[in-house]
Image: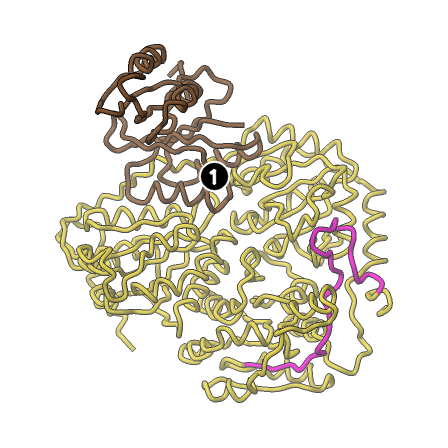
């Protein structure tokens, strides 16, 4: 099962290596890991998607909390949560296919951010499942490349 | 000898301009450091210049690993935080085994390492290594100080982190330019650790629930680990066990927390534990774990470990709870506080049948060896050591068969009496550990019960003991094998003794060459008088006991078996 874990960490060198190293050393599975600044320059937020059962997740939470520069750990399981991925995707788009593609992009509320003679680049955000669905819809046209951020999340009560 | 006169290092309080090196020395003294271990090097010269006349007893090992084990054992023997220092690159790398040893056994240590100048970092400079990167998995915390203004605070934080909660080693990497840059100090002792919180008291409701469960239990066992010793909670443990009337078994690191001479003691449990401890754990209806972590050498096959018992787990580290075994009542906090509170809430209960059963197991399955053998049995040497030291010596060990015999046949009555590498199983720990302990406790008898192969790994530290005129004793139980490995090859690899023997030097000659006393014993009849002579030596003394070469440690729970599926009980029986 996938869990989204959010960790507030001190913005210091080595913290990312420490967290990533702990996951590797304890054989925990990371699906995605996103680090970014917060409103406080001293703190960063890591959003980590982990695969494992409840017992594994309990250990992940505890081992994360044990790392000294990790200030707070939250597991969003069972909570109403807003979780989003951002993706840039370049799709083959010869002029004959463009109209069709644009309506597909419209349906997914994507945005065309670059265009060339034979391709378009689309920016799209949303829950992971929506991004996955968009990819499979685009596949028949030919996907040239994909860059995804991994999930960031926030609890609705926050 | 350098002078120990009162130096400029003494005052940390005043606001003044200081170099980084001076701040380091002042902060160490402020933290109560009077002894440290370490080896200098190029990038540490500014600091060592300040240590020249600092009121700190400085022990130079012959290898940084030795220094790290000495600081570790100093901490284990006293409860104070051990301090070790090493230079950049190879010096820092040589600390890794020692740090990992301390990490696995939760020993409070602060390691300081030199580093190349900050502007050279990342350039593959001479003697540069990514020390914080290399040591991150083997320290509780580590960091590099790049600004002299952060130095005092970082060192204070290191001592605080090392010595609180689940204790462990903390490393600070010190670029040489930070040692020489100056800054104004204001005497502030602030720390900034927003992510480090401690839970001391333990949840009152959980404690009451635990007490109720204990009061109801007819067949409880108290299972005690090294955490009780780290927490200085041996007294509280004994009071609690006595009040509730509980049989007590200990892990390798827990030995000494409870007096093994008491009838309630079940001695050590686990892979080479006593049969009566393992039977009691498997049959108990309540297992009360305190400061123990359900290590695989204790539980054997986890699924069947104490399968019929409810489990109470008291530990300072939340991550230890329900890691290997799922727990009914967890109590997170300081064992000293929680055990005192529990003692108030438990009732005395006779549990006659349970204690009768335990007494029968003890009678039927004692630890034994062949006393009629004409060859020197290792267990005999340890029993003789026990008798002649009246059970009062501090015992350090290497790792292997001799370590297990030292755990089985010396009966410990005091916390911090048995110093051994449990979690990591670091061969070569014994000699430097004995040195660290003797520095900490100059008036006690300190004995390294060692194996020949373990001793080989760090025997160069004998020079350190000679230099500091330490009256440590080293008893090498010499079977000419890596004994435990040989035992496994005998039992599980059809006696194919692949690479498990080596040609050893004459240890008595080596000892003499290094300036220590050296003796060899190959006759059983000479054991008592040689031990007597050894104990009266004022110089470091090495005794090479030529023991039975293929003696095995029994009982033994083969890997992956339940702890009541012990091999060797029939062999022990035949020695009666």
Q: Position of residue B415 (x, y in %)?
A: 57, 56
Residue B414 horizontal side relative to residue B302, left or right: left
Identify the residue shown where x is 42% and y is 67%: B65
Residue B6 visible in image: no
Q: Is residue B305 magenta?
A: no
Compared with residue B429, is residue A84 higher up or lower down, i.e. above or below?
A: above
Q: Mark 1 packing: few (<14 Cα in 10 Å), some, or many (20+)?
A: some
In this view, the residue in front, B35 or B573, is B573
Residue B465 position in % (x across, y down): 45, 77
Point out the image quarter for the N terminus of chain B: bottom left
Residue A135 or B166: which is nearer the viewer? A135
| Colour seen for chain A | brown
Q: Is residue B368 above or below residue B27?
A: below
Q: Main secondary structure of the magenta part?
A: loop
Q: Is residue B399 above or below residue A37?
A: below
| Residue beneath disc 1 | A63
Relative to A13, is B270 on the left or the right?
right
Name the side, left or right, on which B435 lies relative to B354: left
Q: Which residues are magenta?
A: B542-570
Where residue B280 sits: x, y (%)?
Answer: 77, 47
Which quadrant, please, contains the C terminus of chain B? bottom right
Residue B557 colored in magenta in the image? yes
Q: Which residue: 80% across, 79% down?
A: B373
The residue under the point 34% across, 34% down is: A9
Which chain wears yellow?
Answer: B
Horizontal and vertical percent for residue A121?
27, 24
Q: Is residue A135 visible?
A: yes
């Amino acid at each position: 099962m996938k869990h989204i874990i959010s960790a507030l960490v001190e913005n210091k060198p080595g913290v990312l290596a420490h967290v990533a190293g702990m996951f590797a050393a304890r054989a925990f599975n990371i699906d995605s890991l996103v680090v970014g600044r917060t409103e406080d320059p001293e703190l960063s937020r890591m959003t980590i998607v982990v695969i494992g059962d409840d017992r594994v997740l309990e250990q992940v939470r505890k081992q994360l909390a044990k790392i000294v520069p990790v200030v707070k750990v939250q597991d969003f399981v069972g909570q109403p949560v807003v979780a989003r991925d951002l993706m840039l995707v370049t799709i083959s788009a010869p002029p004959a296919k463009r109209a069709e593609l644009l309506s597909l992009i419209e349906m997914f509320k994507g945005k065309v951010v670059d265009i060339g003679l034979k391709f378009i680049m689309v920016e799209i955000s949303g829950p992971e499942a929506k991004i996955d669905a968009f990819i499979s819809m685009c596949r028949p046209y030919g996907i040239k490349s994909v860059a995804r951020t991994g999930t960031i999340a926030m609890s609705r009560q926050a | 000898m350098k002078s120990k006169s009162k130096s400029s290092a003494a005052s940390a309080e005043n606001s003044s301009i200081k170099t980084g090196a001076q701040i380091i020395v002042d902060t160490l003294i402020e933290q109560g450091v009077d002894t440290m271990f370490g080896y200098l090097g190029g990038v540490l010269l500014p600091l060592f210049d300040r240590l020249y006349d600092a009121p700190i007893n400085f022990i130079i090992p012959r290898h940084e690993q030795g220094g790290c084990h000495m600081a570790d054992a100093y901490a284990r023997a006293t409860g104070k935080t051990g301090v070790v220092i090493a230079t950049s690159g190879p010096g820092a790398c040589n600390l890794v085994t020692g740090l990992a040893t301390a990490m696995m056994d939760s020993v409070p240590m602060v390691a300081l390492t030199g580093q190349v100048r900050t502007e050279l970092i990342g350039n593959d400079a001479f003697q540069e290594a990514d020390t914080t990167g290399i040591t991150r998995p083997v320290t509780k915390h580590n960091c590099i100080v790049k600004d002299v203004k952060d130095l005092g605070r970082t060192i204070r934080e290191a001592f605080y982190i090392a010595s609180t909660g689940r204790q462990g080693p903390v490393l600070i990497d010190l670029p040489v330019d930070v040692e020489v840059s100056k800054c104004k100090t204001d005497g502030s002792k602030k720390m900034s650790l927003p992510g480090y919180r401690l839970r001391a008291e333990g949840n009152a409701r959980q404690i009451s629930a635990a007490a109720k469960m204990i009061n109801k239990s007819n067949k409880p066992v108290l299972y005690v680990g090294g955490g009780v010793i780290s927490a200085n909670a041996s007294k509280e443990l004994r009071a609690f066990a006595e009040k509730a009337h509980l049989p007590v078994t200990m892990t390798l690191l827990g030995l000494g927390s409870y007096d093994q001479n008491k009838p309630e003691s079940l001695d050590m449990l686990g892979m080479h534990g006593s049969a009566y401890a393992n039977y009691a754990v498997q049959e108990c209806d309540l297992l009360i774990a305190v400061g123990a972590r359900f290590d695989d050498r204790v539980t054997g096959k986890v699924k069947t470990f104490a399968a019929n018992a409810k489990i109470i787990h008291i530990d300072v580290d939340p991550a230890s709870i329900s890691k290997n075994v799922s727990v009914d009542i967890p109590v997170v906090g300081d064992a000293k506080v929680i055990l005192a509170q529990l003692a108030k809430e438990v009732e005395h209960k006779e549990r006659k049948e349970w204690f009768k059963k335990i007494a029968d197991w003890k009678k039927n399955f004692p630890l034994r060896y062949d006393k009629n053998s004409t060859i020197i049995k290792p267990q005999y040497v340890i029993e003789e050591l026990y008798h002649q030291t009246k059970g009062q010596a501090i015992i350090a060990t290497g790792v292997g068969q001799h370590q297990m015999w030292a755990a089985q046949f010396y009966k410990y009555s005091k916390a911090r009496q048995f110093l051994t590498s449990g979690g990591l199983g670091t061969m070569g720990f014994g000699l430097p550990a004995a040195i660290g302990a003797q520095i900490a406790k100059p008036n006690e008898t300190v004995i390294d019960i060692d194996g020949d192969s373990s001793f080989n790994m760090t025997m160069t530290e004998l020079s350190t003991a000679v230099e500091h005129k330490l009256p440590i004793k080293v008893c090498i139980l010499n079977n000419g094998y890596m004994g435990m490995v040989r035992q496994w090859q005998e039992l599980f690899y059809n006696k194919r003794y692949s690479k498990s023997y080596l040609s050893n030097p004459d240890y008595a000659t080596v000892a003499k060459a290094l300036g220590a006393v050296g003796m060899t014993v190959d006759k059983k009849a000479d054991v008592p008088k040689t031990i007597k002579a050894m104990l009266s030596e004022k110089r470091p003394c090495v005794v090479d006991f030529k023991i039975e070469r293929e003696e095995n440690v029994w009982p033994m729970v083969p890997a992956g078996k339940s702890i009541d599926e012990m091999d060797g009980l029939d062999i022990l029986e035949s020695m009666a």
